[in-house]
């Protein structure tokens, strides 16, 4: 039995997963982002340093002691390991992306797994509003490449002074309230996080926007305005985000009532891990949730099954199969002896190419459209051209 909260990928679902990787890689490359692969195990203190007051570290980290008594964790997210990789290899400034499995000891439920996958971008070493905009536009373009048209919920956490003012306001406002045990801890560790609480509601409290400095508010409004002018659908909201390290914009992307991904600016993260600060922005998109919301169009476009009428035609059929695969056409044929009827009964092919004695003598094949069962004879030389249309 597979472990709780894990998922097997095979058949159509795995095909869709690979397509998501291919299509998103193309979008990342068009923005000149290059791929990184970090290990799936890291020292636990990497996450403890940057995510100290978040649920990811307090409740969800998959940690263990290895045989040399080191405290190791399975990676729960991509930003901290990418930061470590960037610092150790001196890559900044840089534009990076990752596609990777992650692990969180979450309560398994629909759309929430203990091993899940994210694709994410990290734009490291840039502080201009163009870098914030690039991240929003890149995220949006990935979604549009899957015909997903959702909405960003956006907020701005601002400079340390703005956040300090808001933190003080929140502490004063909630100190006498009867809150859940998680919120009691949050009030001590990072009071902003109470706004993410699923148990207590703090809708009556003021939004952080009212506490921003003039400079921060101007920047926030400029980013929203420029993004909207470029076709990004967004709505201001008082979201804070579960992970601790955000400093400027933060956003969640909603589609069909589900959050498919999230991100923001985290200018303090690098100084937590390394010696100096490096302004950065990024996002992560949950692949499982994306897969649940994608419809594949034109599936199995030119998928072909080559069919030998009898045993003496099998070698010719095999050769035709090799020739079609070299031309990039998805092709298969029966590796065991089967009659025509059972060869034709296989699902998942748009065409069958039937080869009998008569076809071989005339250098032709019979092309059968599997959707409507119509058939016609075509010359072998023309077949690649016909199938590629
Ligand atoms: P986060 O890294 O928590 O900001 O999450 C970013 C996105 O990753 C979410 O919007 C989800 O789509 C996805 N995600 C996060 N945690 C899980 C999980 N346990 N299972 C499946 N997807 C997840």
Image: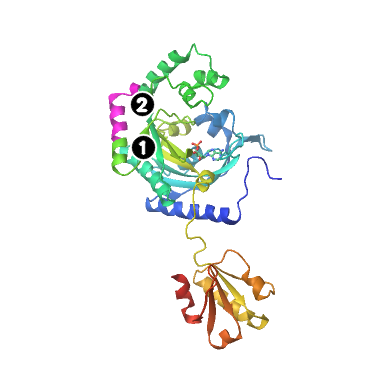
Taking the image as drawn, is residue 264 in sight? yes
Give the left or right position of residue 373, taking residue 236 as reference. right
User: In the rendered view of the protein, which quadrant contains the C terminus?
Assistant: bottom left
Image: 332 above or below 68: below
How many numbered markers are drawn? 2
Does label 1 or label 2 sit earlier along the sequence? 2
Residue displayed at 34% across by 41% down:
133
Residue displayed at 28% across by 42% down:
229
Viewer-proximal residue among 377 and 327: 377
Q: What secondary structure is found at the residue carrying circle 1?
A: strand
Q: Position of residue 144 (x, y in %)?
A: 40, 49
Image: 83 above or below 54: below
Image: 44 above or below 230: above
Taking the image as drawn, is residue 249 in sight? no
Q: Which residue is mark 1?
A: 234
Viewer-proximal residue among 284 and 247: 284
Find residue 126 and report its image quarter.
top left
Q: Which residue is mark 2?
A: 159
Q: Which residues are magenta?
A: 209-222
Viewer-proximal residue among 44 and 200: 200
Disc 2: CA contacts within 10 A as few (<14), some (14-19) or many (>=20): some
Quick check: marks 1 and 2 in contact, CB under 8 Å? Answer: no
Marks 1 and 2, how far apart at CA: 22 Å
Direction bottom: furthest residue: 361
Find residue 1 and report its image quarter.
top right
The mark lying in front, picked from 1 and 2, is: 1
- CB at mark 1 closer than 8 A to ligand 1? no
Q: Position of residue 275 (x, y in %)?
A: 44, 32
Residue 216 in magenta stretch? yes
Residue 224 in magenta stretch? no
Q: What secondary structure is found at the residue carrying circle 2?
A: loop
């Amino acid at each position: 039995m597979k472990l709780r909260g894990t998922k097997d990928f095979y058949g159509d679902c795995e095909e869709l997963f690979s397509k998501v990787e291919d299509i998103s890689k193309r979008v990342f490359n068009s923005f000149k982002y290059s791929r990184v692969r970090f290990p799936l195990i890291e020292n636990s203190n990497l996450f403890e340093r940057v995510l100290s007051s978040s649920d990811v570290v307090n409740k969800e980290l998959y940690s263990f002691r290895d045989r040399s008594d080191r405290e190791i964790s399975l990676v729960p997210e991509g930003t901290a390991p990418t930061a470590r990789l960037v610092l150790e290899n001196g890559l900044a400034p840089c534009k990076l992306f990752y596609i990777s499995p992650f692990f969180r000891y979450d309560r398994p439920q629909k759309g929430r797994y203990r091993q899940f996958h994210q694709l994410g971008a990290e734009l490291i070493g840039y502080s201009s509003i163009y870098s914030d905009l690039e991240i929003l536009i890149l995220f949006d373009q990935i979604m549009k490449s899957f015909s997903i048209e959702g909405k960003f919920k956006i907020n701005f956490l601002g400079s340390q002074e703005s956040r300090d003012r808001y933190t003080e306001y929140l502490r004063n406002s909630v100190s006498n309230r009867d809150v859940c045990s998680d919120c009691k801890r949050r009030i001590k560790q990072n009071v902003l996080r109470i706004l993410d609480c699923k148990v207590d509601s703090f809708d009556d409290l003021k939004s952080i926007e009212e506490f921003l400095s003039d400079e921060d508010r101007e920047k926030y409004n400029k980013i929203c305005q420029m993004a909207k002018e470029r076709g990004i659908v967004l709505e201001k909201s008082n979201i804070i985000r579960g992970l601790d390290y955000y400093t400027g914009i933060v956003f969640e992307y909603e589609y069909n009532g589900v959050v498919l991904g999230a991100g923001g600016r985290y200018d303090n993260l690098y100084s937590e891990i390394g010696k100096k600060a490096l302004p950065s922005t990024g996002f992560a998109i949950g692949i499982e949730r994306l897969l649940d919301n994608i419809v594949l169009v034109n599936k199995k476009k030119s998928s072909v099954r080559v069919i030998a009428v009898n045993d003496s035609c099998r070698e010719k059929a095999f050769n035709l199969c090799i020739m079609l695969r070299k031309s990039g056409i998805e092709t298969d044929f029966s590796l065991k002896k089967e009659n025509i009827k059972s060869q034709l009964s296989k699902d998942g092919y748009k065409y069958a190419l039937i080869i009998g004695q008569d076809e071989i003598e005339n250098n032709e094949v019979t092309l059968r459209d599997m959707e409507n069962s119509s058939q016609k004879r075509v010359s072998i030389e023309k077949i690649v051209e016909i199938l590629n249309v």
